[in-house]
Amino acid sequence: MTNFENASLLLGQLIAFDTVSHRPVIELASFLAERCASLGFDVQLYPDPENEKKTNVVCQAGPQKEGGLIISGHMDVVPTEDQPWQTDPFKLTQLNNKLYGRGTADMKGFIACTLTALSRIEVKNLVEPLTLIWTYDEEVGCKGSQKLVDALKNQPNLLPKEALIGEPTDFRIFRMHPGHVSCQIVTTGIAAHSSKPDLGISAIKRMQSILTSIEILEADLQKETKYQNFLERPYVTLNVGSIKGGQAVNIVPDKCEIILGYRPLPGDDPLAVFERLNIRLQELACLPKGSWSMSLLNVTPALHTPEHQPLEKILCPFASDPQASAAAFATDGGNLAKLGIHSLIFGPGSIDVAHKANEFIELSALKKGTDVVENVIRLRCEEPLAYF
Ligand SMILES: [Zn+2]
């Protein structure tokens, strides 16, 4: 069997683990831990303190010293319900040189490439450290990598300072992306019979003024552009993703709740927009103190890796575009940056087919991905002096 056939065989095994984010990831994590241990890595699990069925996997090889490389990917995938799949999303299916299944592109394909590449390498010969990080709950706000960073914050030098995160970029190099912050805003009022609305206070009406403030803020933010040549939308985008309020048509509602998400730009304080909105709402005369509250739900930082990192130089000859640019989506790289790690996002497959029905990866991309990862490891960790 060729190494390439190994990659698609392995991808079939990875796809068969149903690791939709709300389900346990422990079985896939154990599979990867075992596989990496058999390749010669020291493996450490970093379980979620609140849920033992979720864990990050950190695998280390090579000498313990400065330098080296992290290769990282997330193990979880997005749901498939209510999507018009033509094949079983958890059974890898080959049709016309494409492999279909949930996670083929985002991003179990890359994990298969990495493990296949490693089977061609003697990790005991590495002269620079090589660390593999497989995370959970990336698709629901990069929560796994956040927990890993919390666990490692007192050992900042445990990990190498450069990371390759193999999200599906069609082999483009991304060194920036916006982050994502979600928050909840709740208004309260006084319930009353709708025939006597003057006896009550509508929480939905209060929310209406908050929504207007958010709209004005959105227009202001659109004028505050940054990285125009880099980002498709070079400003902070906002979205009210859900709204809930009221019980019945004949009751003045006493509670309303929205979930707001926004995408902070690289280099900005991720909480700046949250604080700005908070101040604006405090100034609204129609919102007395105690009638509303605003709380943070999740913060995924933006990525802002400086240009011309050594890894960028290595990836360049393999990239579909030699110019590093910015991704529209967030990754674990924003959290890893808190440990001083510079990440580049680069991998096989296309983000355009991710998160949808009939997600696929081209066989050729899986093959190229395996070759590239092998080259990157050799150039960065096996013979770095020959390269630099
Ligand atoms: Zn992904």
Image (cartoon, rainbow, N blue to C red):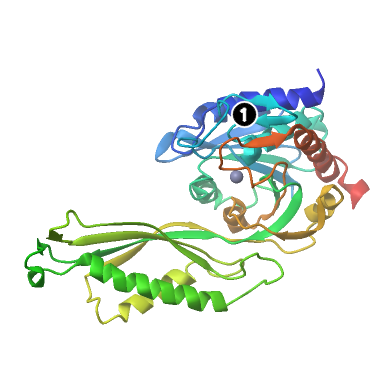
- Closest to the observer, 30 or 22: 22
- The residue located at (79%, 52%) in the rendering is 311
In the image, residue 31 sits, relative to residue 310, either above or below, namely above
Image: 330 above or below 97: below
Relative to 264, is 110 on the left or the right? right
**Vertical position of residue 375 compared to residue 338: above or below:** above
Residue 368: % across, % down: 81, 37
In the image, residue 197 above or below residue 357? below
Indicate the position of residue 163 as horizontal and vertical percent values. Answer: 70, 49
Q: Is residue 194 left or right of residue 384?
A: left
Going 62% across and 23% down the picture, which residue do you hit? 13
Counting the numbered discs, the total is: 1
Q: Position of residue 75 (x, y in %)?
A: 57, 36
Nearer to us in this view, 260 or 136: 260
Residue ID for mark 1 = 32
Instruction: Tell me the quarter of the picture where residue 123 sits.
Output: top right
Residue at the right extreme of this rendering: 386
Does label 1 point to a residue whose CB lies under 8 Å from ligand 1?
A: no
Amino acid type at image mark 1: Leu
Quadrant in the picture for the N terminus: top right
Mark 1: give few (<14), some (14-19) or many (20+) Cα within 10 Å. Answer: many
Residue 168 in view here:
yes
Q: Quadrant of residue 42 in the image? A: top right
Residue at 70 percent of width and 58 percent of height: 175
Residue 34 appears anywhere in the view: no
Q: Where on the image, by quarter, is ligand 1?
A: top right
Of 198 and 311, nearer the camera is: 198
